[in-house]
Amino acid sequence: MSHPGFPGDGSATTHLVHNLVEEAVRSLEGVPIPLTPRTPPNQWPVEEISTREALRHSISPSKVRELLDFSALLYADEPDDNLLCPICKLPVITPIITPCDHTFCLECLKRHFRSSDTCPIDRTRFRARDCKTSRLLTNILDSLVVECPNTERGCSEKMKREEVVKHTINCRYTLHDCPDKACDKRVQQWLAVSGKCWHFEQTCEYCEDKMEAASMADHINKKCTKNTTSCSDCGVTIKLSEVSQHRDGSCPEASVACKYVDYGCTHEALRKILGAHQDDCIYKVVAVVGDKVKAQEKQIEKLQKQTEDQERQIMELKEERRDCISWDDVFSLNNVQGGPKFKPTEAVMTIYEDMERRMEELKKELTDLEGRQTVMVLNQVMPIKDQITEIRSNLGILKMHMAWLMNKSREEVERSRLANRSVSSTSRTRGSSDSDGEAGPSTSRRLSDGSNGIPRL
C-alpha cells in the first residue's frame, strides 16, 4: 500500500539515499556528525531522576525511590523562587521546558499531561516530544545543598543534591531489610551489617524501659532521662552522649588552647580565664592578617570551583549544541567548531546507516498505519456481515413458511379432487335412468370458478 510522502518502492528509496550520500560527500569535510537518535513522538526528551540516578549508581529505579523521596528533601538554604515548580511549589526535580517556555518538574508535568495536553499556566497545547530540558538548569538544581534523608534518625550530613543518592546508599542510618529472612521488619544499616536480627525486646540499663533492641541506641542517646553523668571538670549533670560536646564547647573548667593557636600561640588555660589572655595575646595582630588570608584562600577555592563548574557547563553546552545540529546543517555547513571530526568516508557511512535506520522507522510506521486501517475496515465490515447473516436467517425462515404453505395448498387440492370424484360418480348413477329424457343445456365452467377442484388463492 502506497502513501503520499513516502517512497513507493525500493528503487525510489535507493535513489534518495544515493542523492543524500553524494551531497554529503561534497560538503562534509571536517563536520561533526550528530549521533543522537531522534526522540519518538510520544516520548519525553529526558528520563525521570530515579532512572538517571539508577544508571549512575548501577541500581534499579525502584531501589532509588525506596532510598529517598526527592520531593521531601530539606534544603540547607531557601531556594530561589525561580527554581520552584509552579505545580508542586518545590524546587524542580527534573526540569522540563514546554514549547511556551514554562519550566516544571517532569514528574508533575507527566501527571498533568495524563488529563490534559495543555500548559498548566497559559493553556497552550503541546506534545511531549516538543518539550526540552536544560543541562544548565539541571546543574544549578543539582548543586543545591540538602540534608541527608536520614536526618530524623541521627545523620547530620549535608551534601549537594546530585550526591544525595550516593550518600544515602552508604549512610549508616539508611534502613535495610532485617538480616533474618524470617523477619519482615527493617533495621538501620549499621545494625544490619552484624548479620543478626535486632527485633527482640530489651531493657534499658538506665531507666529499665522495655523496647526493641534496634531502637535502644537512639533511646539511650536522645530520649532516656536517666542516662546522665557529672562532668569531671565542673560537676554539671549532663547526658552521657553530650559529654564531649560539653567539654569542647561550654565547660568553664576545661583546659583549652588559645584561639590563635593556628598562628603560633601555644598558651593553654581554663576556659573561664582564657579570655583575659586572648585579649592581650601577641598573636592577635597576626590573626587579623591570617583571617584575611584564610578568607582569600576560601574565596580563591570558591572561584576555582565556580570556574570548574562553568567549564563543565560550557562543555555540556557544546555537546548540546552539537546534538542539536540538524541534517540540513550537516549538508550546508563547511565547518563547525567543537565535537569530533570525521573523515568523508566515515561520515558517508554514518549518514548511510542513519538513512537505513530512518527507512526502518518509515517501514514500521507504514506497517502500523496498515494495521490501523485494517482494524478500521474490520470494524466497519463486521456490522455489515452481522446484518447479512441476519437477512439470510430471515430468508431461511421465510422459505420454511412458504414450503409449509405450499404443502397445505397441495393437501387442500387433493381433498377437493377426491370430493369432486365422489360427487360425479353419484350423479352418473342417478342420471342413468333419465338418459332417455331431455338433455338439459350443458353449461361450461371456467377453470377459475373453483368447480375444477382447485381452490382460488
Image (cartoon, rainbow, N blue to C red):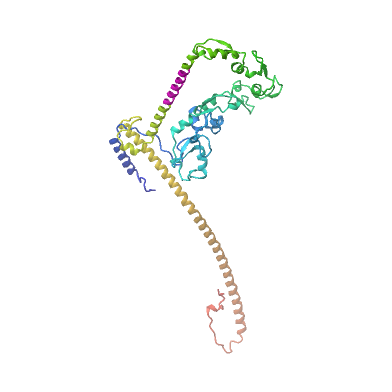
Instruction: Pick the quarter of the image with the C terminus.
Output: bottom right
Place of residue 65 in the rendered image (x, y in percent of width and height, measured from the top left): 55, 32
Residues in magenta, as a range: 291-308
Main secondary structure found in the magenta portion: helix
Place of residue 386 in the rendered image (x, y in percent of width and height, measured from the top left): 52, 56
Q: Which one is nearer the viewer's eye here, 224 or 284?
A: 284
Q: Residue furthest left?
A: 26
Quadrant assignment, res 100: top left
- Answer left or right for 104 relative to 323: right
**Magenta stretch contains residue 300:** yes
Q: Residue furthest bottom?
A: 438
Place of residue 42 in the rendered image (x, y in percent of width and height, measured from the top left): 46, 41
Residue at x 61% of width, y 82% of height: 429
Please state the total of marks drawn on the protein image.
0
**Magenta stretch contains residue 305:** yes
Q: Is residue 167 above or below residue 137?
A: above
Residue at x 38% of width, y 40% of height: 359
Q: Is residue 449 above or below residue 234?
A: below
Place of residue 129 in the rendered image (x, y in percent of width and height, measured from the top left): 44, 40
Residue at x 65% of width, y 18% of height: 240
Residue 258 visible (yes or no)? no
Residue 19 visible (yes or no)? yes
Q: Which one is nearer the viewer's eye here, 283 or 126?
A: 283
Q: Is residue 71 above or below residue 288?
A: below
